[in-house]
Amino acid sequence: MTACPTGIAHTYMAAEKLTQAAEALGHEIKVETQGSIGAENVLSDNDVRDADGVIIAADKDVDRSRFAGKRVLVVGVAEGIRHPGELIERVRTAPVYGGEDGGAGTAAGVAASAGAGGGKERSVGYKALMNGVSYMIPFVVVGGLLIAISLALGGHPQADGGLVIPDGSFWKHVNDIGVIGFTLMVPVLSGYIAYAIGDRPALVPGMIGGWIANTGALYGSKAGAGFIGAIVTGFLAGFLVVWIKKVRVPRFVQPIMPIIVIPIVATTALGLFFIYVIGRPISWVFTHLTGWLGGMTGSSAVLLGAILGLMIAFDMGGPVNKTAFLFGAGLIASGNQTVMGMCAAAIPVMPLGQGLATLLRRRLYSEQERETGMAALFMGLFGISEGAIPFAAARPAQVIPANMLGGAVAGALAGTAGVTDAVPHGGPIVAVLGAVGGVPVFFLAVVVGAVVTALTTVALVDLSERGKGRKGAPAGAAAAPAVAAGAGAGGPSGTAAATGARTGAASVPAAAPAPAPTAGEGDEDGAGDEGGDEGRGDGAHAPADGHSVPSPSPEVLSGYLTARTVRTRLAAGEKEAAIREMAELAAGTGRVTDVAELVRVALAREAQGTTGLGEEIAVPHAKTDAVTAPVVCFARSAEGVEWGSPDGTKARLVFMIAVPEAAAGDEHLRILALLSRKLMDPAFRARLQGAEDAAEVLAVLAEIR
């Protein structure tokens, strides 16, 4: 079984390598791939029963329960690519899998192969955190939206401007269901972080640990540790279980270890540790922060508002947030409503800001994050700050500072104008219902704070991804100047794409003389005069190296790769410049509306993990609306480009795949799977390297089916 975090190229490369190695060694093999398209070539019960051993080459968690009683070898996906023959020999003496004791193997395998994807983001810690966040998001969305809907449709305005849902009513029950969702989200985050590290035995201690972390009353605090505490308990539970699994126990105890011994020992140890060790500092923080804020009531309202905004935005339900909230709520009864006004302005800033960020720069976020962003916007209107927790948990280094800055701005603006709030709640909803004094400034504070949060988040996330994507490339790295076929040899590179689109000819390196246009190239569509040669289209034009291509040319990858997207000599010597050169080559088809955006998205994908596949191959790819239809480019580099490939080889065969964001579907995954499998054939790669011109390149690539 092969799988990688993105479920694309490495998954299929490892499968092909293992298949080739098994055939060479005279063994029968079947490989199940768990890619982004879904599980393919699935192993049946009969396959598993008849197998002598099972190799799992994966950098993600896979279900191993069906392999109980079989020899199981767990490694990173890169090992399946680098040493397939060695793995086949090793699995013959691998330990027999007992059915429930394999979490450590997964964690160890992932940690050992963290570099397989080319970045530390694929470490066991990152994967575990993302696993927890992905399971938590539905609870945040369902709980938050049900609470917001119940308030909007079933809430009754009060004299003081508050909103109350009558007990026993239909909407009260809907609200209660939403509260349950919110209550479960923190334990779920903790539990599935632990599960990703320690497998099923870690799920119970992780969830119970998360519940304890979120229940301050268990350790003498008025506020629980919130999602930050859940992250701590998740990692503690996961690694504690991994450690317990290593303890040698008598054979008769082994069957009950994963279902009784490990969960009980880990849960008890973690729970008591949090209550007696971690919980006390949290309680101390809560108490002393409250006292400190009490001494500031006579100081500058602007400073106090900024501090309260920072605290509200920091942990969204944790002790710091709750300290500020309860401080403001407690002063309402004494007649001081301005402190709660500062808090009320800061409370919706985080979900509104993070939701706005997903709208401002959609391409920085996954589809799931964009959907969560829409839900966060709705929750923000009702003062539900927890809507921003998924973003903060996934990118704490970028999101939490941005949240705090926006919260501080909103709190300070509210403090400057003396905004008041008569109820212990925040968000636009309380202003609409009449609980806020100074409504115009209140809304101004909320809007400005949300915009500051959104812009800061986008800037920090973009900066982080660009920094990872460059990996040492010069800031100004770019492709060599290019001109369109038929244009002047000294034409500026900036016009190459546009000229190429008009003439239908591909761009060539500036150092190479442009070939004379062939018949029909001067027309707008590049197809010759009306009634001219049929079938000229893409395949009829001179390719980048200047060699003519017979018409019609073979269809390659559903026609996405054509003569005008083939370059037999890549000019760039570094990754970023190579991606830019490939993007400009794609622009020659007229299917790219924004070359710079295509380059940015491709580099952002590189930041998630290298697309260098090894074997001197790289397949950069991007989903972006900067392209109007799928396009595939191919180029060869004589010297090779350093791409961070798992086997350390430089990329000499470079494919670039670009598909529209809106209509991508699984098309780019299908193309990647086809390429990855075929490129594992040494003879195919040799023919591709030896092809003399674009016509021969297309003929070789036409073998891909």
Image: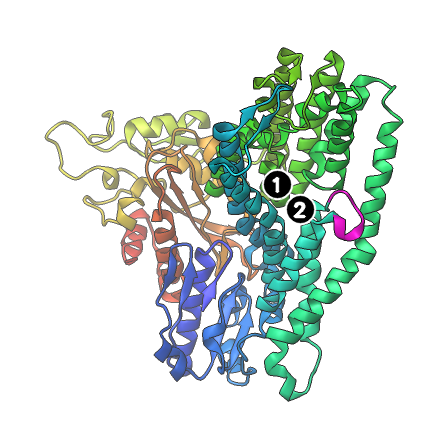
Q: Return the x and y of residue 295 as percentages of the image width and height.
A: 89, 27
- Name the foreground residue: 103 vs 323: 323
Q: Mark 2 falls on what kind of element?
A: helix
Left or right of 242, for residue 631? left
Figure colour scheme: rainbow
> Residue furthest toward the right?
295
Q: Which residues are magenta?
A: 217-223
Residue type for callout 2: Phe
Residues at marks 2 and 1 touching, judged by CB atoms closer than 8 Å: yes
Q: Which mark is residue 389?
A: 1
Picture layout, residue 383 above or below residue 554: above
- Name the foreground residue: 209 vs 679: 209
Q: CA distance from mark 2 to mark 1?
A: 7 Å
Left or right of 335, for residue 106? left
Q: Which mark is residue 227?
A: 2
Picture layout, residue 378 above or below residue 92: above
Is residue 634 visible to the viewer in this orientation of the structure? yes
Q: Is residue 485 magenta?
A: no
Picture layout, residue 554 above or below residue 542: below
